[in-house]
Image (cartoon, rainbow, N blue to C red):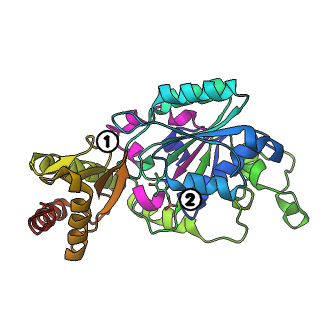
């Protein structure tokens, strides 16, 4: 995973965790330690995240004791990516007020619509301002395996930490996430205590930092689940190629679905999909009832039971999400999904149609 991101395998470090929520908690605690924050600094140390950042970021800040750190919600642009100019504006305003920029969180594949933030430009800002730069690649990270998509992630290599979920992009069983940190020492320093029980792990002459890394010094866990097996075994048996192909397939299926739904006049679609998620909504004759109509449509789809979609609200507008990321989803599934959606729309009562 470190290599996929482009981190130097000798100096970076990572750890398998339960998922991206835990990985984000570890990232935030690592950022706090790396920047030497003390309790008295919290109220002045600003965290920048996009309006559409995943809720796990706020949860991690709360759990890491940083609830008092001011959170600045950066606007998103027309493609629902973090607006770099707005981030810059907010940072200079905060500095004028005597606050310190502390943490910048970018997203590589948003949960709501698979949008990838301008990671390089955000890296630029983080470096200039001396902030810790965390990238949430929980959903999107493994699309870096697809040569056509790698370019979208340019700049992720400049992140200080990355959260990534093999239980999403590698289709593995739930409970398989990871934290990756560019300067592995930071991860180690934030998660280790040199105590008597673990003295065997204390640095010995002639052994490198890498040789000494134990998962118990890279995360909150000591006795831990054997997550490595779930990830190592499929890769050992099949190699990476089938995973790469499956990801390419999901992207093609998503684009195809987007084009098909876009053609139907009673539907409106969001920005064209960057990865394997897009949003759409039904456009009723009475625009004031759009939310109600789409809630009803989604309820009809779920009642049908053959496919599972969810909803999201972006900029006050209610959308239905089409997320294609199951290894069992193929073209026949997508065709069936279109039938289910269309039949559900036919069933809308006339006042919502
Ligand atoms: C799924 C997701 C998360 C949370 O990951 P868990 O593994 O469920 O904890 C965080 N961020 C994004 C962008 C996600 O898609």
State the separation of the CA atoms marked 2 and 1.
23 Å
Residue that label 2 marks = 21
Determine the image quadrant of residue 308. bottom left
User: Where 207 sits versus 124, above or below?
Assistant: below
* Span of residues in magenta: 143-169
Q: Earlier in the sequence, mark 2 or mark 1?
A: 2
Q: Residues within 10 Å of mark 2 (few under 14, many from 20)?
A: many
What residue appears at the point 12 percent right and 50 percent down from the top-left corner? Answer: 260
Judge whether residue 151 is colored magenta: yes
Residue 233 spot, x, y in % from top left: 47, 66
Label 2 residue SS? helix
Q: Residues within 10 Å of mark 1 (few under 14, many from 20)?
A: some
**Is residue 64 something that shows in the picture?**
yes
Residue 311 spot, x, y in % from top left: 33, 59
Residue 26 spot, x, y in % from top left: 66, 54
Q: Nearer the viewer, residue 201 or 114?
A: 114
What residue appears at the point 76 percent right and 50 percent down from the top-left corner? Answer: 190
For the image, the number of numbered tags is 2
Q: Nearer the viewer, residue 305 or 72?
A: 72
Quadrant of the frame with the C terminus = bottom left
Residue that label 1 marks = 274
Label 1 residue SS? loop
What residue appears at the point 65 percent right and 26 percent down from the top-left corner? Answer: 129
- In this rendering, would 267 be left or right of 97? left
User: Where 21 sits versus 132, above or below?
Assistant: below
Judge whether residue 299 is colored magenta: no
Determine the image quadrant of residue 345. bottom left
Q: Nearer the viewer, residue 116 or 287?
A: 287
Outermost residue on the right side: it is 196
**Is residue 323 something that shows in the picture?**
no
């Amino acid at each position: 995973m470190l290599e996929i991101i482009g981190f130097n395998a000798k100096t970076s470090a990572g750890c398998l965790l339960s998922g991206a929520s835990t990985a984000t908690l570890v990232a935030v605690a690592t950022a706090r330690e790396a920047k030497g924050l003390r309790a008295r600094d919290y109220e002045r140390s600003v965290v920048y995240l996009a309006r559409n950042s995943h809720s796990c970021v706020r949860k991690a800040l709360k759990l890491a004791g940083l609830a008092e750190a001011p959170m600045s919600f950066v606007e998103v642009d027309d493609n629902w990516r973090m607006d770099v100019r707005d981030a810059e504006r907010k940072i200079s305003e905060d500095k004028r007020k005597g606050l310190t920029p502390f943490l910048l969180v970018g997203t590589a594949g948003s949960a709501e619509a698979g949008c990838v933030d301008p990671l390089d430009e955000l890296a630029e800002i983080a470096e200039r301002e001396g902030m810790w730069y965390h990238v949430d690649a929980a959903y999107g990270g493994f699309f870096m395996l697809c040569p056509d998509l790698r370019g979208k992630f340019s700049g992720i290599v400049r992140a200080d930490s990355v959260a990534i979920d093999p239980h999403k992009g590698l289709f593995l069983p739930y409970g398989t996430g990871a934290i990756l940190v560019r300067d592995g020492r930071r991860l180690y320093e934030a998660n280790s205590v040199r105590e008597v029980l673990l003295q065997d792990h204390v640095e010995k002459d002639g052994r490198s930092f890498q040789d000494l890394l134990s998962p118990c010094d890279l995360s909150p866990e000591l006795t831990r689940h054997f997550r490595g097996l779930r990830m190592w075994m499929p890769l050992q048996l099949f190699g990476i190629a089938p995973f790469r192909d499956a990801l390419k397939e999901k992207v093609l299926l998503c684009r195809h679905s987007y084009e098909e739904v876009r053609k139907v006049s009673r539907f409106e679609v969001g920005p064209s999909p960057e990865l394997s998620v897009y949003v759409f909504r039904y456009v009723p004759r009475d625009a004031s009832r759009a939310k109600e109509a789409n809630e009803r449509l989604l309820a009809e789809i779920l009642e049908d039971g053959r496919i599972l979609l969810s909803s999201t609200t972006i900029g006050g507008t209610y959308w239905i999400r089409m997320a294609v990321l199951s290894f069992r989803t193929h073209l026949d599934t997508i065709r069936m999904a279109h039938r289910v959606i269309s039949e559900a729309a036919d069933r809308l009562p006339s006042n919502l149609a």
